[in-house]
Amino acid sequence: MKRENLKLVALGGPNTFGGDAARSLRELYPEFTSTIYFPTEKEAANFAKNGADAFCAPQQMARTGFHPGIQSYVARPDSHLYIVAEVSHAYHCALLVKPGSKLAQVKRVLGHTGSITQSRPWLVANLPQAEIEIVDTSSQGAAQEVAASDGSVASVGTPGMAREYGLEQAGSDIDGGSIGSYWAISPHRLFSDRPQRLVVTGRFNEESNLSGLIAALAVRGFLLLTVYQVSSRERLFEYDYVMRFGGEASLADVEAVLSAHPLARLAGAFEVSGEKT
């Protein structure tokens, strides 16, 4: 499959946090020519049914670190998913309320996992009377509930979401300037012939020569940037890893290195199209 005319899927709609990140990915990677939206993560990640080529999902946040759900999703030994693009994206979380509502009357604050996590310190400090609730859908569903409320419900959403539903921003950038790194996760092996970013996964223990793999990639010009690990729950000191490397070399050279390390899986080999925050 070629890297052209790719469909990107995002959670909720064009004004969700995922929608904003998907728009940034499309600006940097023009091979993504359209975006489709689904209300839940389960639907967004169901490539067999949704017709998408990649799912725009957060992999790491500046304030809270790795997104364990997404990382574990890629790290599983039976995973057949690939990382085909990445972008850094500022959240710009806002507290959305019904026009005329005051902070003192807010009893519930709704939001999706990432936005609530980034904004929780501000919410706790400024809305001590409110119950903070993480919704199963997206920030769009949360905004819809605010618009239909009596003013006692608020949500964490984007400025675009406020405009879409006629809501007011009772607080802006309440996440303290948090930035997230988003991946385009695909069921397709869309590798560049000369990648600048690698994602390598695998289950390693003390006897697996993980250091040898890292050293061999360094010789080829790829340095280790980030490491996520989760216990295999089967052996002591055994973990499923997601390793992200930066550099530049031919795909053939990279595959030659990995051929000597059968426990490793090349889960991403793509060019870096720039940073957008």
Image (cartoon, helix red, strand yellow):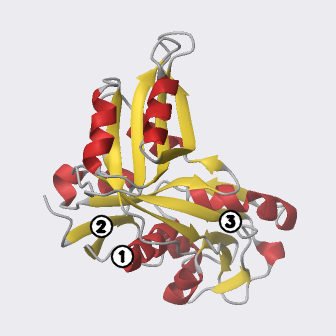
Question: Where does the image place residue 239, in percent across and percent down from the top left?
Answer: 50, 23
| Residue found farthest to the left | 1
For disc 3, the marked residue is: 178
Q: Amino acid at mark 1?
A: Arg
Which residue is denoted by mark 1 in the rendering?
A: 26
> Residue 53 is drawn in which quadrant?
bottom left
The image shows residue 181 at horizontal and vertical percentages of: 54, 60
119 or 271, which lies in front?
Answer: 271
Q: Identify which amino acid the numbered label 3 is placed on.
A: Ser
**Do tag 1 and tag 2 residues touch (Cβ < 8 Å)?**
yes
Q: Badge 2 local density, few (<14 within 10 Å), some, or many (20+)? A: many
Amino acid of disc 2: Leu
Say what secondary structure mark 3 lies in: loop
Whether label 3 touches label 2, CB < 8 Å: no
**Marks 1/2: CA distance?**
8 Å
Local secondary structure at mark 1: helix
Residue located beneath label 2 in the image: 8
Give the residue drawn at x 46%, y 21%: 204
Label 1 and label 3: CA atoms lie apart by 21 Å
Whichever of callouts 1 and 3 sits on the residue coming sooner in the sequence is 1
| Mark 2: secondary structure | strand
Residue 198 drawn above or below residue 57: above
Does residue 189 appear in the picture of this structure? yes
Q: Residue at x 85, y 68 (%)?
A: 126
Tag 2 or tag 3, which sits nearer the N-term? 2
Q: Considering the image in quadrants, where does the C terminus appear? A: bottom right
Q: Residue at x 39, y 54 (%)?
A: 41
Horizontal side of residue 167 vs 24, given as left or right: right
